Image (cartoon, helix red, strand yellow):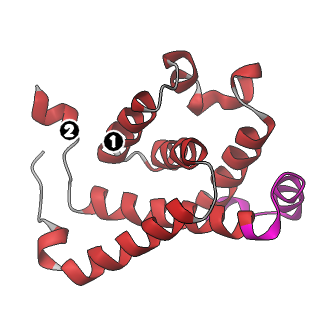
Amino acid sequence: MSQRLDYNRVAPGGAKALGGVYAYVMQSGLDAELVDLVYLRVSQINGCAYCLDMHTRDLVKKGVKIEKLALVQAWREGGSLFTEVERAALAWAESVTLVAETGVPDSAYEAARSVFDEKQLVDLTIAISLMNGYNRMAISFRNRPQAVHES
């Protein structure tokens, strides 16, 4: 499968705007590893190979163990590999990403609010929304994962 177009080249202003949101998330005070775990989970749900490759590499660079990475998709069964905060963030990421199916119920909100303060929850939701946007761009225009370029 080949790339359809380079959206960064075609619409640099739009790509820069997305980058601004990314920069906001990175300075928001949310833990960078937590954000990358959420980005990975959102990308798994959406089936974005480009983003799966990128966020897995980012987490490996941050020293996340392969056992944990292997279980992100099944985090509920991951036991003590995932902290309470990570479990809450992953559950919120799933509910928000699958909004058409879940409607993001009150129970999901209440569970997230038991762990995150209001600003953290808004920032986390911005991060989730951003990754859903990036996933849609990468999938729509067929960005190829770095792993494909290396083979």
User: Residue 93 in the image: x percent, y percent?
Assistant: 64, 53
**Does the stretch in magenta take in 146?**
no
Using the image, determine if residue 59 lies above or below residue 80: below
| Residue 91 image position (x, y, % from top left) | 72, 47
Instruction: Classify residue 62 as left or right of residue 29.
Output: left
Return the residue found at the far top: 67
What residue appears at the point 57 percent right and 32 percent down from the top-left corner?
Answer: 73
Disc 1 residue type (three-letter) = Met
Residue matched to label 1: 54
Under circle 2, the secondary element is helix
Give the numbered dot on residue 74.
none
Q: Quadrant of the C terminus?
A: top left
Residue 61 visible at all: yes
Say whether residue 105 is magenta: yes
Height in image: 109 above or below 16?
A: above
Residue 148 falls left or right of residue 140: left
Question: Which residue in the structure is indicated by mark 2?
Answer: 146
Residue drawn at (75%, 32%) of the image: 83
Q: Are marks 1 and 2 in contact (CB under 8 Å)?
A: yes
Q: Quadrant of the N terminus?
A: top left
Q: Which residues are magenta?
A: 100-119
